[in-house]
Image: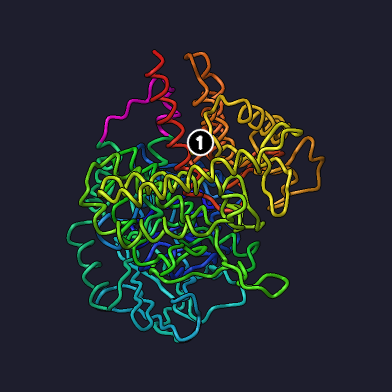
């Protein structure tokens, strides 16, 4: 179940599912140390024993409507249970400057009689992602539950104070089942622990009461104690108001020209910026996605890493929307990651260490190979040049010119086949094929052009000439070796040859190798549109023909070449923007932008891909890259539309 609601501040990130359960809680880095890791921290309601002695966990028997407050990273969700005659309204946020997750719950008794009600919360927490060696206690001085181990502390409290609690061992039910009949008031447990708290309220017929609940995260007892006192003295209502105002001001600091797009597009554009913000670590790492559901389908690994390729696109989206301070911090983070030989490896942890990877260092024949996607190295240089063009700050480039730009450029000119001028084989952007790819070659061409621009700016004219020469040799190689005259389109790759139609072939024009109206580009992009279009009511563009990743059923590839991806569909839109000669020519792009808006979830999330039959989100959600691509496409549309008026 992809996560419909996320709230975070760069250090504490909380993911919530459709049943109001906390499913992921990352701290102290976004994407690093998930202390819930897909388990369930549930909410239950009991009303006068009406449900035959058992608490009703918020779930399938509840009607719900999920969402966010407008232009705020604060949730606004409704739940109703007609059997219990109860309505709940949730507002949730993580304070932008303090590591506190705050919930405001408005409870309404829709019955015509007075009732006694209990609202219960369970906490299935495993600190450091390991259930061994935790301690959970009830602290009577703070009137709080505290889970702790080593330098990880989570304090759970509320206002008014909860009146019952229970600390005990994790049960066989991983969700931490909530039982009625009162909690046992056990105050301490070690090892694999869970905790539960209960708020009791008497509500008159039709009455609404407010309960606040919060989790403070820190590295010491004194830190969570300070945070708890801060919430109590400032009041949780004020803390939540501060959060809402901050996020509103952050996303509205610029008055974006969004042409004549309807409000739903404007809303998704701003919401995408807020979602992107939530996925960026305070130390600079831009994380691909934080969704523990992928663990089950990804061999117990996740997307909670910094992929240089994804991050480069996201950085460009942030720069074009004037969040260049965040982008600058990202490049400072990257400075310490580049290999001494001038390339980036597959992915990195938010802490700046090398992450897990599946690209082998040996070929099947036992020969040494570089386990890289060269586009990742090239795109960081492209994003850096984009950053400079927007900020016009040479001071931002000074620290990385010699430490990052030149080493990367030197690697790109050397890691080439002298017989073709093209880059040597590396893994493609989809990370499943090693070859000489049209996409990778196009990004390396652009990376070298940008490196040449930097060199010229610093007066290193010999380097600028060297990088430009290498770029022109790659351009020639792309035209001579990667375009197939008989097929009338570009190949996915050579060495080995692969004729598969791939959405990433948009890169030939997107990165300036050839103009968008070049006959070879046009024929290639028409093949992408015709062959990779998903011919169901869902629509969209697949990654490549016969893509099996996250396949939901076996189907005719002529109808469903693969699951539709937001980024691939938006790439087609970007090509149509490049091709447009009049406002009318932008109609196809407008349709794709509206399609993206319609296919977002009710809470404004863009998943990695969609179920081709019902349009439901598949794989991770939200995917930061998808939101960034939407932002880039809308901005490109507006720029082109204004130029054509």
Q: Is residue 313 magenta?
A: no
* Circle 1: element type: helix
Give the overall secondary structure of the magenta segment: loop
First to last magenta residue range: 254-267
Q: Which residue is mark 1?
A: 510
Q: Is residue 570 left or right of residue 225?
A: right
Residue closest to the eye, 481 or 123: 481
Tell me the residue at 51%/31% (across/down): 574
Q: Is residue 498 left or right of residue 227?
A: right
Tell me the residue at 49%/69% (across/down): 355
Tell me the residue at 52%/63% (across/down): 346
Q: Is residue 476 left or right of residue 542?
A: left
Question: Residue 230: where, in percent of width, then height?
Answer: 20, 63
465 over 485 or under it: above or below: below
Residue closest to the eye, 597 or 330: 330
Q: Is residue 258 magenta?
A: yes
Q: Quadrant of residue 221?
A: bottom left
Residue 491 shows in the view: yes
Question: Residue 41: where, in percent of width, then height?
Answer: 49, 64
Question: Residue 326: where, in percent of width, then height?
Answer: 30, 51
């Amino acid at each position: 179940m992809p996560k419909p609601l996320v709230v975070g501040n760069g250090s504490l990130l909380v993911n919530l599912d459709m049943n109001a359960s906390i499913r992921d809680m990352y701290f102290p880095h976004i994407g690093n140390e998930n202390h819930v890791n897909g388990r369930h921290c549930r909410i239950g309601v009991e009303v006068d024993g009406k449900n035959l002695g058992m608490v009703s966990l918020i779930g399938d028997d509840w009607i719900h409507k999920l969402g966010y407050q407008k232009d705020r990273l604060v949730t606004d969700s409704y739940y109703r249970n007609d059997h219990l005659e109860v309505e709940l309204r949730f507002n949730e946020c993580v304070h932008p400057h303090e590591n506190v997750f705050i919930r405001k719950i408005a409870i309404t008794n829709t019955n015509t009689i007075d009732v006694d009600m209990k609202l219960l919360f369970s906490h299935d927490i495993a600190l450091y992602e390991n259930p061994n060696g935790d301690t959970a206690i009830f602290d009577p001085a703070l009137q709080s539950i505290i889970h702790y181990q080593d330098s990880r502390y989570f304090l759970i409290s509320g206002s008014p104070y909860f009146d019952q609690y229970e600390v005990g061992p994790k049960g066989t039910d991983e969700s931490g089942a909530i039982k009625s009949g009162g909690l046992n008031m056990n105050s301490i447990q070690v090892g694999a622990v869970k905790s539960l708290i209960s708020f009791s309220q008497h509500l008159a017929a039709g009455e609404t009461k407010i309960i606040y609940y919060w989790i403070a995260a820190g590295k010491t007892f004194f830190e969570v104690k300070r945070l708890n006192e801060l919430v109590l003295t400032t009041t949780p209502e004020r803390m939540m108001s501060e959060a809402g105002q901050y996020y509103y001001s952050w996303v509205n600091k610029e008055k974006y020209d969004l042409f004549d797009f309807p409000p739903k597009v404007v809303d998704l554009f701003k919401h995408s910026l807020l979602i992107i913000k939530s996925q960026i670590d305070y130390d600079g790492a831009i994380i691909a996605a934080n969704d523990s559901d992928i663990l089950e389908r990804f061999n117990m690994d996740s997307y909670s890493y910094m992929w240089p390729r994804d991050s480069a696109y996201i950085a460009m989206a942030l720069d074009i929307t004037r969040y260049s301070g965040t982008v600058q911090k990202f490049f400072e983070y990257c400075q310490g990651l580049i290999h001494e030989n001038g390339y980036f490896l597959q992915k990195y942890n938010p802490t700046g260490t090398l992450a897990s990877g599946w690209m082998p260092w040996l070929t099947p024949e036992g020969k040494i190979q570089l386990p890289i996607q060269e586009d990742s190295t090239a795109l960081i240089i492209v994003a850096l040049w984009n950053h400079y063009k927007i900020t016009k700050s040479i001071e931002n480039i000074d620290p990385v010119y010699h430490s990052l730009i030149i080493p990367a450029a030197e690697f790109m000119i050397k890691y080439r086949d002298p017989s073709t001028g093209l880059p040597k084989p590396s893994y493609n952007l989809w990370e499943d094929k090693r070859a000489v790819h049209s996409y990778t070659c196009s990004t390396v061409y652009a990376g070298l052009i940008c490196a040449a621009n930097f060199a010229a700016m610093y007066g290193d004219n010999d380097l600028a000439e060297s990088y430009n020469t290498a770029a022109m040799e790659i351009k020639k190689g792309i035209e001579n070796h990667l375009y197939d005259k008989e097929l009338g389109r570009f190949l996915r790759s050579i060495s080995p040859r692969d004729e598969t139609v791939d959405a990433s072939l948009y890169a030939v024009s997107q990165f300036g190798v050839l103009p968008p109206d070049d006959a070879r580009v046009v024929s290639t992009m028409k093949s992408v549109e015709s062959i990779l279009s998903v011919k169901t009511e869902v629509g969209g563009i697949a990654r490549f023909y016969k893509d099996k990743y996250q396949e939901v059923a076996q189907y005719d590839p002529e109808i469903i070449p693969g699951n539709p991806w937001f980024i691939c569909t938006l790439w087609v839109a970007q090509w149509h923007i490049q091709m447009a000669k009049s406002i009318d020519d932008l109609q196809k792009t407008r349709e794709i932008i509206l399609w993206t808006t319609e296919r977002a979830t009710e809470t404004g999330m863009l998943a990695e891909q969609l179920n081709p039959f019902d349009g439901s989100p598949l794989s991770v959600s939200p995917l930061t890259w998808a939101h960034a691509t939407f932002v880039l496409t809308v901005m490109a549309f507006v720029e082109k539309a204004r130029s054509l008026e």
